[in-house]
Each structure stands twice: as C-alpha cells, then as structure tokens.
C-alpha cells in the first residue's frame, strides 16, 4: 500500500492529466453520440454468449469485422465486466485504459532509468509530451474499446519485473498478453538469445496453464472444439482486414511490385530470420563491451521488435500504440542529449504518426494519408530515428 501511495505521489501529475484527458475523450464521444466501443461490444457479447452456452466463433457481434477472435481463456478474464450493464462496462473499460496508459509510461520510464541510463528524468512533463504524440491513437482506442494499451502495459510491467530478477509474475503477465495476441510470441527471441532461461520456463508453464484452464469447466470435447475454432479464426482474421501501413502494402503502392495476399506472413518470417541473424552477430560484440550494454541490447531489441509488428501484420491503426515505449525512450534521449537534426526528424515523424484524423485533416486529406500509408511510414521513421539517436549516443560515449 505504501509503495502504491509513493508511486502515486511521485507521478500524480501524469495520473491526473491522463485521467482528465480520458474523461474528456469519453465526454466528447458521448455528446457526439459516438461512444459505441464496437470492439469492446464484441468481447462483451461474446462473453455473454459463452456463459449462455451459445456459439462465440464465426458469429458477428456488431460491425462487419465484429468477430470474436481471441482464445477461450480470455473470456474468463473478461467476464467480470458482465456484472455491469453495457454502458457502465464501457465507462469502466475506458477507466482501465487510462490506468493502463499511465502504468505503461511509468513502467517504460522505470526500465529506461533503472536499467539503461541510471539517472533521473529532469523534466517531469516528458511523459505528458509522449501522451500528446499518441493521443490520436488513444482517442481511437477508446472509440473502439480496444485492448492495445492493456497489452502494452502487460508487456512493459512483465519485462520490468523480469529485469528486476522476478520470473513468476512476469511469466504470467507476458503469457496473458500473448494469449490476447498470439503473434507477440516473437518477443521471446531476444529473451532466448540473452539466456533468460528461468523466465522462459515460467512463461511456458503459464502459457500451458492458461491454455488448459478452460478445460476444467468446459470438458475435453468442447475445449478441443473451441480451440480449433479459435485457431481457425486467427487465420481468417486477415481475410476481412486490410492495412495500407504494412511492408507489403507500402511496397505495392510505392514500388508497384505484385505481391499476393499472404505476403505479410512472408515478411514476418523474413523479419524473424534477419532479426535473428543480425542479433547473433551484434550480441557477441555487445557482451564483449560490458554487461550494461548487453542489458541495453535486450531492452531496445525487445521494444523495437514490439514497435515494428504493425508494419508487418495486418492490424488496425491503434495497434501502432505498440511504439509508445520507444517514443518515450527517444524523447528522453533528445532531452538529455539535445541534437537539433534528430529533434527535427523526430518531430516530423511524430506529427505524421499522430495527426491522421478526420477531425484534424478533414475527410479527404485524411483519406489520402490513409491511402499513402503515412502512419506506417511514420512508425518506421520513428524506429529509424531511435536507432540513429542511439548510434549518436554511442559515438559521444
């Protein structure tokens, strides 16, 4: 309790700013009759159907893309929402998203300060600056009632606790995130190379526990059927979604190469292969320099890999919130070691990353930004800028 109170007092500015911002977004959504949370509606209605012994997969719960595509175990963790009416549950979910946003920023900051730079952030408003960059995506996150900030929070808190020497709680937190979005399993790659064996065992055991948990009240036959349908739904997900921001779409639009509909999967496999190859080469070099640099390599590679996911897989635009920790890292380094050239580059890509909204640009210009894949380009630009900043820091040191 004392730790929670100290954490609040230390970060009360960011707490209150975020809660006021989310309250304002919810208020604007309500008065404009847009507080629908269609993604949240899918989770809510699917959970209801589950407990009424009705089908949850292959059923349209709302919009054309409103299919439940998550694991059976996710419904167990989601079920407390069913205590409340739908509108009340929506407001509660918005509150949880606000808490998740604050916890993500605080956890990312703690990882940076305790395990990378070992110094304090002088400007306490840097976290608020990070929120301004991602605010447009937060608006959409609330509008749809998605889970991305909850996922990023789980990944940050789990990673932070693992760096602090724990492996039981981190294994659970990251396993839960992976069960929400199975493609996050690729984040295990840098952990494997850095020989985080205890954590990997913990993660594996938690994943096994979470996978088999529903069998205790479903029975083996229904359990197998639901998981078969879940796996089928995962592979069907890309069939009714399209993104202009993936490598596949950007290459198709700007280089006019003919790529088939499964190309994003080839890019994912290619990314894993190239990432592994480069990492094996650089890891030895980092380890030879110092243990601190070895730690840095793990932290940065984990969050770079997380940030690039929406450029590889077909997802909604709010999934670019995965770049939040990396954005915060860049802000810190630019504040700590100012460089006008990198500041300009960072600001340009930050604006392009966060500006595409019909309320800001108008419907026509916003549509052009979407068609040109500006968000995808901006996200890659932010990742590249962070790498350039890091390279500059190494040269100075």
Image (cartoon, helix red, strand yellow):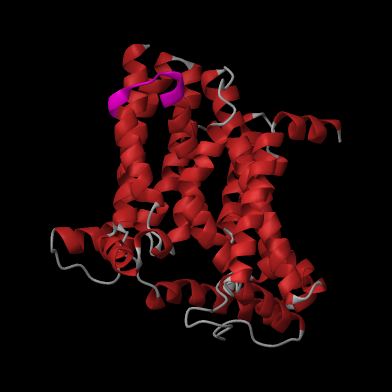
Residue at 42% across, 44% down:
305
Where residue 96 sits: x, y (%)? 69, 55
309 and 62: which one is in front? 62
Q: Is residue 74 left or right of residue 217?
A: left
Residue at 72% across, 75% down:
86
Residue at 82% across, 72% down:
83
Question: Count of labels shown?
Answer: 0
Residue 36 falls in image quadrant: bottom right
Residue at 43% across, 46% down:
307
Where residue 215 sits: x, y (%)? 73, 72
Residue range highlighted in magenta = 334-341
Q: Is residue 94 left or right of residue 229?
A: right
Q: Quadrant of the N terminus?
A: top right
Q: Quadrant of the C terminus?
A: top left
Residue 196 falls in image quadrant: top right
- Whether residue 59 is visible, yes or no, is yes
Q: Is residue 3 above or below residue 227?
A: above
- Whether residue 269 is visible, yes or no, is no
Where residue 99 sits: x, y (%)? 68, 49
Residue 207 counted in the magenta span: no
Where residue 362 sits: x, y (%)? 35, 65
Dominant secondary structure of the residues highlighted in magenta in the image: helix
């Amino acid at each position: 309790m004392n730790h929670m109170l100290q954490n609040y007092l230390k970060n009360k500015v960011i707490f209150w700013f975020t809660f006021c911002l989310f309250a304002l977004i919810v208020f604007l959504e309500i008065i404009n009759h847009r507080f629908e949370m269609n993604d949240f509606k899918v989770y809510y209605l699917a959970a209801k159907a589950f407990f009424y012994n009705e089908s949850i997969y292959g059923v349209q719960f709302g919009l054309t893309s409103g299919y439940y595509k998550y694991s059976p175990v996710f419904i167990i963790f989601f079920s407390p929402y069913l205590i409340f009416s739908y509108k009340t549950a929506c407001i509660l979910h918005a509150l949880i998203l606000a808490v998740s946003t604050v916890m993500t920023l605080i956890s990312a900051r703690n990882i940076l300060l305790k395990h990378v730079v070992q110094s304090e952030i002088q400007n306490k408003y840097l976290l608020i600056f990070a929120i301004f960059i991602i605010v447009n995506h937060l608006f959409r996150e609330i509008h749809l009632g998605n889970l991305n900030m909850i996922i990023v929070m789980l990944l940050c808190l789990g990673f932070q606790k693992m760096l602090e020497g724990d492996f039981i709680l981190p294994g659970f937190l990251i396993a839960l995130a992976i069960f929400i979005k199975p493609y996050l399993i690729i984040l295990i790659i840098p952990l494997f190379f850095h020989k985080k064996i205890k954590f990997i065992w913990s993660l594996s055991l938690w994943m096994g526990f979470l996978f088999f948990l529903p069998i205790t009240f479903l029975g083996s036959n229904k359990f197998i059927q639901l998981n078969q349908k879940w796996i089928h739904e995962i592979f069907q997900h890309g069939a009714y979604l399209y993104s202009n921001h993936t490598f596949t779409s950007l290459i198709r639009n700007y280089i006019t190469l003919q790529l088939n509909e499964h190309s994003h999967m080839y890019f994912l496999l290619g990314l894993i292969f190239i990432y592994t190859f480069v990492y094996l080469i650089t890891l030895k070099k980092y380890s030879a320099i110092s243990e601190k640099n070895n730690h840095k390599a793990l932290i940065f590679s984990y969050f770079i890999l997380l940030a690039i996911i929406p450029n590889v897989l077909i997802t909604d635009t709010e999934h670019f919130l995965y770049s939040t920790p990396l954005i915060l890292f860049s802000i810190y380094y630019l504040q700590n070691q100012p460089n006008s050239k990198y500041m300009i580059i960072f600001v340009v890509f930050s604006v392009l990353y966060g500006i595409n909204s019909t309320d800001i640009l108008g419907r026509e210009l916003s549509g052009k930004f979407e068609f040109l894949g500006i968000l995808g380009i901006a996200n890659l630009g932010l990742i590249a800028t962070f790498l350039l900043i890091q390279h500059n820091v190494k040269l100075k040191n």
